[in-house]
Image: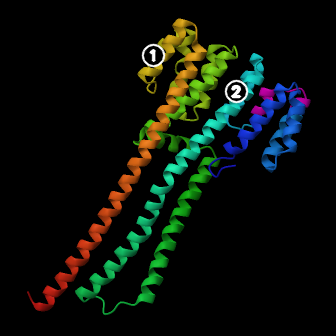
Amino acid sequence: MGLLSAQIATKKLVPLCRQMASAYDAGIPIIRTLEMVREGVKDRQLRDTLTHIGDDLRRGSTLGEAVRNQSKYLSPVLIELLASGEAGGKLDVMLRDLADYYEDRLEMRRRIVGMSIYPGLQLVAAWFLGTFALRILGRVSGIMSGSTDSFNLTAFFRDYVMFQAAAMTAFAIVAAACILLARAGLFQWISGFVTTFIWPLGPVVRKFALARFFRSMSLMVGSGMHIQHCIERAAAVAANPYIERDLLSAIPKVRRGATLTEAFAGSRYFSPVAREMLMVGEQTGKLEESLYKASQYQYEEAAHAVHILTRVGGVAIVLAVAGLIGYIVISFYANLYGGIMNELGV
């Protein structure tokens, strides 16, 4: 489970979905498949979740109902695709696609983390070294101006440690508040606003959300679900309240007989390319294939945006550090020569 959510981590769902897909393809019933997979799982929460799903199935629940009962721990995409796969008679296909989906998502997450490590280290170094240098500069300025008699190194380090402790405490309090709000389900609207509308995160988050939507929509259309249910469930997979609300606004238009192209014409988040792919899919009768291609396009665009974002972020941090160093050097020599001039009476 993650800090911001009680849901089972993606890296644990990758082997789970792959093992379930292999066992189900071999003709093993779903209840026995769950038992076999559970025996090889070490994570307690995942074992308990699989146990509860198996118990619900034995009591006569459908797989969709059983996984929805575990919505606290399972992601919306897993729940909706398993439910639609069962309803459409393509559970084996859904399990394989889920395994591929989580593998792609895990790979993308690793790439993002890998590209963010160096800028992150630069930012941390800039904070600690910058605050250290600025506080030294303040002490030196005080000595030169005569407000401080001497420089006590021990006292300086003690004050610096106390300053960093206070800063880290404040950071921990903010982080704890964010975690509590996220666990209570209240943080998604706040974080969703920041990640959806604030540059530079907005374009990246929107592309990832649409990629999830198109891929889920493709799988659900292929399973034979009614198009309105496909939109509703795929919108939940977007995992963003603002984008989900925008996508759901297309359902009333579809009910009135509009095509998907017409229904999503007013969407704030569809790119022209996405609309074009959707129109081509409807006109050629290959909607499932076009939606899948649209998801691939959005993933590639999102990956490219992440790459640019990390490069730009790294350059911005370097420039900020250089500016801070320049400020410290200029301030130091300005105070030094200013003190000398005062002593000489110039």
> Is residue 221 left or right of 344 when viewed as pictured?
right
Location of residue 139 (image quadrant): bottom left
- Residue occupying the point 44% across, 38% down: 305
Span highlighted in magenta in the image: 57-69
- Residue occupying the point 60% across, 16% down: 288
Give whichever of 278, 99 is nearer the camera. Answer: 99
Q: How is the image coloured?
A: rainbow
Instruction: Give, as a three-letter code, the residue at label 2.
Output: Leu
Which secondary structure, mark 2?
Answer: helix
Q: In this view, does 6 lie above or below 242?
A: below
Q: How crowded is mark 2: few (under 14 residues within 10 Å), some or many (20 or more)?
A: many
Residue bearing mark 1: 276
Image spot of residue 287 (x, y percent): 58, 13
Question: CA gap, disc 2 to disc 1?
Answer: 25 Å
- Residue occupying the point 24% across, 86% down: 144
> Is residue 219 left or right of 85 when viewed as pictured?
left
